[in-house]
Image: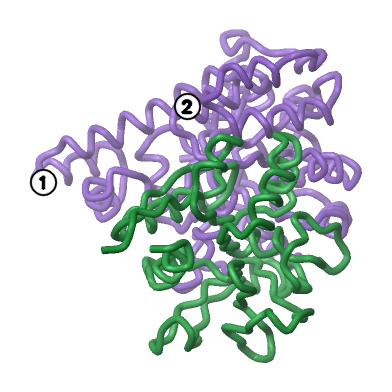
Chain colours: A green, B purple
Amino acid sequence: MSKNVKIGVLSYQGSVMEHMRALSLLDNVEPLEVKTLSSLQAVDGLILPGGESTTISKLLSIFDLLEPLKERIRSGMPVWGTCAGMILLAETVIGEETHLGLMHITIRRNAFGRQLQSSKQKAAIPKISPEPFDLVLIRAPWIEAVNNDRVEILCEVDGHILAAQEEYMLVTAFHPEVTGDLRIHQYFAHMCGN
Amino acid sequence: MNLEQYEINKNLAQMLKGGVIMDVTNAKEAAIAEEAGAVAVMALERVPSDIRKDGGVARMSDPQMIKEIQATVSIPVMAKARIGHLAEAQILEALGIDYIDESEVLTPADDVNHIYKFNFKVPFVCGARNIGEALRRIGEGAAMIRTKGEAGTGNVVEAVRHMRTMTAGIRQIQSLAPEERMAFAKENGAPYELVVQIAQTGKLPVVNFAAGGIATPADAALMMQLGSEGIFVGSGIFKSSNPPLMARAIVKATAHYNNPVLLAEISEGLGEAMKGLEIGQIAPENLLATRGW
């Protein structure tokens, strides 16, 4: 039997409850809201949810969690960024300052356009599951380029990279947390040692 | 919009949860709001307290001003259309606005009907005072709800009343026997299918924010503790003595709404909040919350 893993969701803003709910449906996973240093230190892995990356990044700085979070990720804590979370992790964000700057990818923010261009698409992510996934793209970013051999492209639609993994860092431009599909949450739980 | 688009529009509101949406009247204010950590800005010609003071007909903003704001910030840009004014809404959609607020703060264009929001691809947020009003707007296609409060007063009492009334309505629906739901729908002017849905889920089918009279970090924390999923601030920021400081403090308080020790720190030394208005001092015909049907 696998051990119980504690997976946190950075809980300042965005699709926090959606991720918490998805995690609560997995076996042997204990979900935890992370807003403080002590809760950050208590988790085995962390989800950076969807939301507004500028807002979440500012709150990380204001509440002195940016450096401790960087430190934990650098030392190998598994992390999964969805949409805004992917922007936070990237080493380069076109035309903007970077935030955590840890993953070797270049991001284009609001790449598809405004809300009128938000959409749902379908695509396979063979590394995770043979059945296709619903990709909910909300004012979504995409990965313009991967800047390192260690970054594995997991999903590409119309020439745009929408999911990737660099060792213990996972990013998706889309929002599995609003679909009811638990496969990527399950995959991340495995990354966290479940 | 088809149902898939409607879901995607509701999803955008989900991404705004826990955040603060700020009224701005020009690109400079929009930049201040974004820098303070707003999750979105609401573009309008005058903040509600000025609309209240100036009188006259309040309309949709100048598209040029909206475009300048869109060019300035990377966060979503919302804008207000008058209740029932479907042409204003079409113009805002053509501008590529991210969310339309069909708002009682502007002078209503139709005193019977609201916009049929399913005719649009762009999402709508609407104000409500109680569960019946919220479900009527959702029935017309609103993808997000906010309390009406009493805009431009800096007085949170009406927002509190509306949030509590909505929550009480949800609890009441949950307590109904199935055969009582139709009578509830009739009495509250609520679509029956949505009443049934709330009976099953125990919550509104869309995200619900607080709006109307929020003027301090403590006001924001109060509304979050009452179950609001995020905050709209209108006059409260740019009518305070130090807008950048007040804006950031309200963002911080909304994120840490249940941490009184931090809230005490956040509330310190912010200067003057906007001057408030006692609701009883407002003539009934000047109340904004009673607009909408």
Residue A192 at x, y = what percent? Answer: 47, 62
What residue lies at 77% left-to-right and 22% top-to-bottom? B53
What residue lies at 64% left-to-right and 74% top-to-bottom? A166
Vertical arrangement, residue A2 with respect to residue B176, above or below: below
What residue lies at 57% left-to-right and 50% top-to-bottom? A14
Q: Amino acid at mark 1?
A: Pro
Residue B104 at x, y = what percent? Answer: 60, 38
Residue A63 falls left or right of residue B4: right
What residue lies at 76% left-to-right and 47% top-to-bottom? B43
Residue B251 at x, y = what percent? Answer: 68, 34
Q: Residue B225 got which mark?
A: 2
Residue B272 falls left or right of residue A128: right
Q: Please, what secondary structure does the residue beneath circle 1 have?
A: helix
* Residue at mark 1: B178
- Which subunit holds the residue at mark 2? B
Q: Please, what secondary structure does the residue beneath circle 2 have?
A: helix
- Which subunit holds the residue at mark 1? B
Q: Residue B242 got which mark?
A: none
Vertical arrangement, residue B217 with respect to residue A171, above or below: above
